[in-house]
Structures are given as C-alpha cells and as structure tokens.
Amino acid sequence: MPRSLWTTPETVVLERRIVDRDEDTLVLGIETSCDETSASVVKGGREILSNVIVSQVDLHGEYGGIVPEIASRAHVEALTPAIGEALRDADLTFWDVDAIAATLGPGLIGSLLVGVAEGKSIAAVLQVPFVGVNHLEGHLYSNLLADQTAEFPAVALIISGGHTMLVHAKGHGDYEVMGGTIDDAAGEAFDKVARFLGLDYPGGPEIDRLSLLGDPTAIHFPRAMLGEGSFDVSYSGLKTSVINYVRKAESRGEQVSVENVAASFQQAVVDVQVTKTIAATKAAGVHRVFLCGGVAANSGLRQGLAEACQRDGFSLHVPPLELCTDNAAMIAACATQMLRRGRTSSLNASPDPNLPLV
Amino acid sequence: MLVLGIETSTPQASVAIGSEQGVIASAMVSRGASYNEFLLPAIRFCLDQAGIDYRNLGGVAVSLGPGLFTGMRVGVATAKALAQALSVPICGMPSLDLVAYEVRYSPRTICVALDARRGEVFTAFYRSSPGGIQRMSPYGIEKPEQLAIGLGSRIEEVLLVGNGALLYKEEFEDLGSVVELGTMSHAFPNAQALVELTVPRMFREDFDSLYDLKPLYLRHSAKRIQWERIRGSRSA
Ligand SMILES: [Zn+2]
C-alpha cells in the first residue's frame, strides 16, 4: 500500500495556534492507559481547571483484577462524556483549547487506543497540536501540579498496581531510571496477597485498613534488598512467604490473624521501598523526594517515607489522592511542558504498551 | 448535507464522504496499516480531494460492527470524538446491514456472514425493499455448520455474502443452487454504503445519542464467558 498517500505533509504539520502568554496555555488531557477513564483541562501546566475521573473498579471487582477487554469497552463508553464534563467543569469549549494530550503508553494496548484515537481526532478537527505523553512521565507532573514548591531535580518513587520505579528527574524531559521491580509491581503484590487472604478487590486499600488493626512486627517476612548498590526491588519472594506462612499455620490448625499478616506484609513492603528511595535520593545527590502512583495512597508508605525523609533532611512531596491515581490532569500538565520544548506527535501516532520512560 | 462515514470493523477499513447526491470521496485499505494509523490521514485525504474541511461536515456515520473488537473500537472512538468536537450528529450502523445493502438488487433472500474468528460467523438475514433493505432476523453469531443447516431448511433461494461465507464456503457447497455465494467484491462492509444509508437518517434526524453509542460486540469478553461457565457449572 502506498503509505505516502496517507502521510502527506498536511496531515503531520498542524497549524500551530499562537498562544500569547505561555501561562495561559490550555491543554485538554486524556488518560486511558489502564482502568480509569479521565479527561482534564490544565492551564499553564500548573492550574487544574477540571479533572474528571471515571473509575472502573466496580466492573473488574468480580474478576479480582483488571480484565483488558472489559477495560477497553468501558473506555469507549466513558471517554466522550468525560471529555464533555471536563470542558463543562472548566467552563470552556473545544475551541478555547490550545492542544490535546493523550497517554501513548505504557499501559493496556486496547485501552490506550481509545484515548489516542479520540485525542488525535479532536486535535485534527481543532487544528491544534496533538501531544502523546508517556504515562510514567505524567506521574512525575502530578507532584508539580499538586504543590507549587515541588520542583525538579527530585527522586520520584512511582508506585502503583502497574509500576514500581525510582526515577531521578533532573529536569523537564531529563530522566534517569534508577531502579524498578524485577517481578511484580508493588500494587500487584498487594492485590495478590489480598486475593489470597480473601479480601475484596482492590486489595491494596483493604490491606492498608487491616494493617492499622494488626501488629507489623508480629511476623517477620523477608525483605529482598538485592544488594547494596541496587535500587531494584522484588516482591515474588515476599508474596510466596506470606502464602507459605498462612498455609503452614492453617495446617497446624492455628488461627491466623489476617490483621497481623496484613500489617507485617505491608511493613515489609514499606521497609524495602523506603530504604531504596532514601538510598537513591542520596546517590542522586538531590534533596527532594516525590511519591506518586496509586500506592502513594498507602498510609504506611506515606508515614514511613515521611519519617525517613525528615531524618535525612529531604523534603517529601505527596500529591492528594485524586492526583496519585491515574488521572488526565498530570497528562495535560506534562504535555504543556512538552509543548514548550516543541515536542508534539503526528496524527499517525500509535500507542505503545511498553513505551519506556527514557 | 455532507456526511463522513467510518468503517473499520473488518480487515478492510474504509472512509467516505458524501451527501444526498452520492459519495464524493473515499479511501479504502485492506490488511494494510493499523486502523489507528489509517483513519485520520485517510479522512484528511478525502477532505482534501473533496476540497472541503472538517467544518463542512454536517454529520458523522460509523459502522458499529459486529466485527473485530479493536477495529470497531478505534472506529467508534474516532467517530464519537469527531462528532463531539464538531458538534454534529452521529449515526451508528451495523456492519452486516452495510454488506446486505450492497447486494440489495438480488431477488433472493440475503444472508450476510462476516468472519467472527474462533470458528464462528456473525449473521443476519435481509430482503430487498423499495429503496433499501429490510432485516428479517436478529443479529446472531453461530458456527458455519449451524448456519449451513439453517440455510438448508429454508424454502426460498438465498444469496450468501460476506467474508465469513467465503472463508467457510465448503460448508455451503452441498446446498447446491438454493444458496448462491457472493464474491470477494461484496465480502466486506464499506464506508460508501454506510454514507448512502446514513444520509436519509440524518435528514430524518434519526440520530444516535453521542454519549450512549457503542460498538455492537455480540460476544462477551473471553473472561466473562469463562467466568459464567464456571458459575454455571457450580450452580448446576
Ligand atoms: Zn499510573
């Protein structure tokens, strides 16, 4: 097929609207990488005018985890109303918007496709730039959005059901991945342990709730530190030892305290993540720590990291819950910064489920 | 009124722009680029060839499937976003209707069978009616051998069309002259038929709700099917 036919210059180079003042740039962001459908308008990369998040938790609950096909279907139904509501909340029309941003990856391909298709279509109609955003880079901007004192450079712990990553954010668009998980994401480990314990989906908040009722020192679960200089983490061993502990106790006919198991498991995760984050921050030579992603809602992690940061004289920045979980405001904020650097995508842009941060 | 039509529910994707005077521009690709990479450049191409711009469009038409899930979703998502940004009405049409519409001059009963993968076909029966087609059955999904049995028990002659009919044509060979098989040129739904069928709906203001419009899957997600099977066997 003559591909060149479809890639005439007009389809790529868009009539770039001139924004008089950079701080007035209005970006409509779209986020559909996983199981939240979100649309948001952000002004000047810092002021959230609207941030609509439609959660699919109820749809996936009965399956005990995210079902990609169900997520994709839900995005098709939820995204158009979410965009309409985001504009209404911001008291704007499409024609006020200076650029459209959508998450390009990483994430579930079927889910990403919906957001990218809609974002590109709106950009084509309005003749404004389309900005494809890396979801992980977006998470970094949730911190900048939430807190005007938050600035790069910083070391960010991006922690959720889909990712667990330590990033040295040196400046806008200048990142170094210091470490990640070699198996499960932290949130995934929470969900798997919760499912094993028979808790409701999503399991993370349930474990956090039960932890407050249990003794975190009751059971010693292993902390996989993976060597001195490594900022990587591993959760498969911890998950297995929780399962083994419960099975052994049950085979001996002992009553297992779910609260103590939850608290001890959560403490093990917190210890690992806090140790690695502080070590990475020292190694990077910065004094600011960002905590973002869905697991940032975990009370144990927040408290553990806050204490450790205070001890070492680092400032800790944690966004409010609606910016910790996946949301389109962070995508719009990130896109605003990319626009400043002249980084836009073509209308042929395709999502990449494995898009790397750098 | 200029209507943009989008059809991406089978391996053959197409877009077309037309009015009550007929289609003025179209683009089609078979097993080529991904739907997501094809659509907007193809629409741009049609707009340019027709000498118009997005703002000249008075409505958006989209094929709802049944068909390939990813294609249907990219098509419906794109159509919804275009209609939303342009503030124009949207109409959805089943892919099976589009195939039947193309062979509407046949005196035979029309049976459309589109490949549903996993050894099944999406089906519906039609007969021609003044100015168009009339559907005689619900939209269904079945195995080709089941469809063949159904066709064999019919008294009237049938024209069997669609890529599903061609894919499983040996299933229908024993039915003899009662079943005539359509050719490759009428095997796929296309955006030109979509535009032709939708223009009258646009004039009647028989629009779909932008927020409620969704693809016609005719099949639950694999996970749900598996889940219901487990639940079914437990309760049995
Ligand atoms: Zn995320």
Image (tube, grey):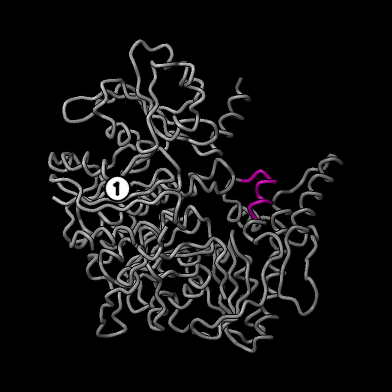
Q: Is residue A300 left or right of residue B192?
A: right
Rate crowding at label 1 as few (under 14), some (14 to 19) or many (20 or more) other CA atoms within 10 Å. some
At 35% from the left and 71% from the top, the residue drawn is A12
On-image quarter of the C terminus of chain A: bottom right
Q: Position of residue B203 (x, y in %)?
A: 12, 42
**Main secondary structure along the magenta-highlighted residues:** helix
At 49% from the left and 33% from the top, the residue drawn is B167
Image position of B1 with respect to A131: above or below: above
Image position of B95 with respect to A52: above or below: above
Q: Is residue A207 left or right of residue B62?
A: right
Tag 1 residue? B211
Give the chain letter at badge 1: B
On-image quarter of the N terminus of chain A: bottom left
Report which quarter residue A247 is drawn in: top right
The segment highlighted magenta reads A190-199
Q: Position of residue B53 (x, y in %)?
A: 20, 63
Image position of A84 with respect to B230: above or below: below
Q: Amino acid at mark 1?
A: Tyr
Q: Position of residue A289 (x, y in %)?
A: 58, 80
Which residue occupies the foreground of this view, B180 or A35? Answer: B180
Q: Is residue A336 left or right of residue B23?
A: right
